Image (tube, rainbow, N blue to C red):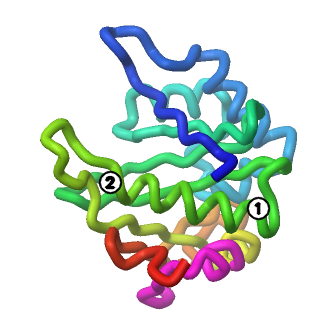
Amino acid sequence: MKCALLPYTDIDGIPTFTDSLIRGLFHRMEDEGLVGAVFSDGSVTTADKFLHLMKFGMNRLFVIDLEGCLAGCVWLNNFETRKADFHFCFFSNLRGDLAVEEGKGIVTELLNMTNESGAPVFDLLVGLVSTLNPAALRWCRRMEFSTLGTLPSAAYDAKSGGSVPGEVFYVERGEYGKGR
């Protein structure tokens, strides 16, 4: 795997990344025209809101480093026992076949995380993708995620001002990546 998954956390009260780096992730999303797709519900519209969400919004953020360059981020939320929702944003230097190859490694790494006692943290990661986001839907299918199907009115779309269908994808620890 060429990518490294770098956690945004506190170590003895010191954050692993500066606020300006986290804001910079959002600015990069803006520069690449990704904000509307990543936050299609309109909940995050500024770098400060993104920083606040990642610092105080019950999210676990990981920065994706591709051979020394920022290549995107992934975050987890809606935690339950051994389950979380997952969200991805890849930048222009992590696209196409590389995004699938590296994405599979990243998902496998997330699924294989363990706690202090060595027990798995997650058995299941779940994602919901708006049907208005064809690029994300294509990537999820190429990632060979399992799917539960399409839920009507599952995602709010700020641009249209209404709810839209969303496809539910999931990956299970121990099952994902078999045959890779």
Residue corresponding to mark 1: 98
Badge number at residue 78: 2
Q: Residue furthest left?
A: 117
33 sits left or right of 16 in the view: right
Q: Secondary structure at mark 2?
A: strand
Q: Which residue is rendered at x = 78% and y = 69% of the image?
A: 97
Q: Which residue is rendered at x = 40% and y = 68% of the image?
A: 126
Of the residues under marks 2 and 1, which one precedes in the sequence?
2
Residue range in magenta is 138-151
Spatial CA distance of label 2 from label 1 is: 28 Å
Residue 143, quarter of the rendered image: bottom right
Q: Which residue is rendered at x = 78% and y = 36% of the image?
A: 28
Above or below: residue 169 compared with residue 89: below
Q: Residue furthest bottom?
A: 149
Amino acid type at circle 1 is: Leu
90 sits left or right of 13 in the view: right
Q: Secondary structure at mark 1?
A: helix
Amino acid type at circle 2 is: Asn
Is residue 140 inside the magenta stretch? yes
Q: Position of residue 128 (x, y in %)?
A: 49, 70
Residue 176, quarter of the rendered image: bottom left
Between 61 and 45, the one nearer to me in the picture: 61
Q: Which residue is rendered at x = 77% and y = 51% of the image?
A: 34
Above or below: residue 13 compared with residue 7: above
Q: Residues within 10 Å of mark 2 (few under 14, many from 20)?
A: few
Badge number at residue 30: none
